[in-house]
Image (cartoon, helix red, strand yellow):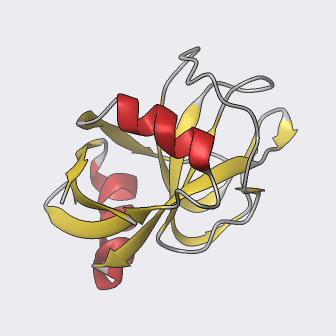
Amino acid sequence: MTKLKIKAGPFEFHARLETDAAPETCKAFAAAMPYTGKLVHVRWSGEGIWIPLGDFDFGVGYENHTSHPAPGQFILYPGGISETEILLAYGGVDFSSKMGQLAGNHFITITSGHEFLMELGNLVLWKGAQPISFEYA
């Protein structure tokens, strides 16, 4: 199990890469570590925040994919119908875009700091984009 430390806005979370369930996605993301970006609030998906990645290609297909990540789960949408993105569910999510329902690869799970997820989501919703960084713990 590969452990991560994630800083998002003023919050810190610990997490694990889901290397058994999504090995190719985890390998591609690990190649980009340490990773930094900006979190913005989702438009169609519910209680989620995402890192828009445009046409960036991680070079992976679907594995361990879902349209309904649980709070504290990160999914990677590898692109195609909509732009590439990484989404974090902080509450109920039905992963969608203006083109319709999507599925993303569940590849990171938060293991500590769940109590701050709703606060982080509301911060992004009401105050705007927040920085996020991923590093090995």
Q: In which quarter of the image is residue 110?
A: bottom left
**Image vertical order of residue 116 relative to residue 13, above or below:** below
Q: In this view, does 88 lie to the left or right of 120?
A: right
- Which residue is most to the bottom? 115
Q: Is residue 127 visible?
A: yes
How far from the left and from the top, in percent, is residue 89? Answer: 53, 64
Please state, as top left, top right, bottom left or bottom right, where the N terminus lies in the image: bottom left
Image spot of residue 48 (x, y percent): 53, 59
Percent across and percent down for residue 130 are 25, 45
Residue at (25, 68) in percent of width and height? 13
**Height in image: 7 above or below 36?**
below
Q: x, y (%) of residue 10?
A: 13, 60
Q: Nearer the viewer, residue 73 or 17?
A: 17
User: Could you tell me which residue is drawn at 66 percent across and 30 percent down?
Assistant: 60
Is 127 on the left-hand or right-hand side of 53? left
- Establish if 14 lies above or below 4: below
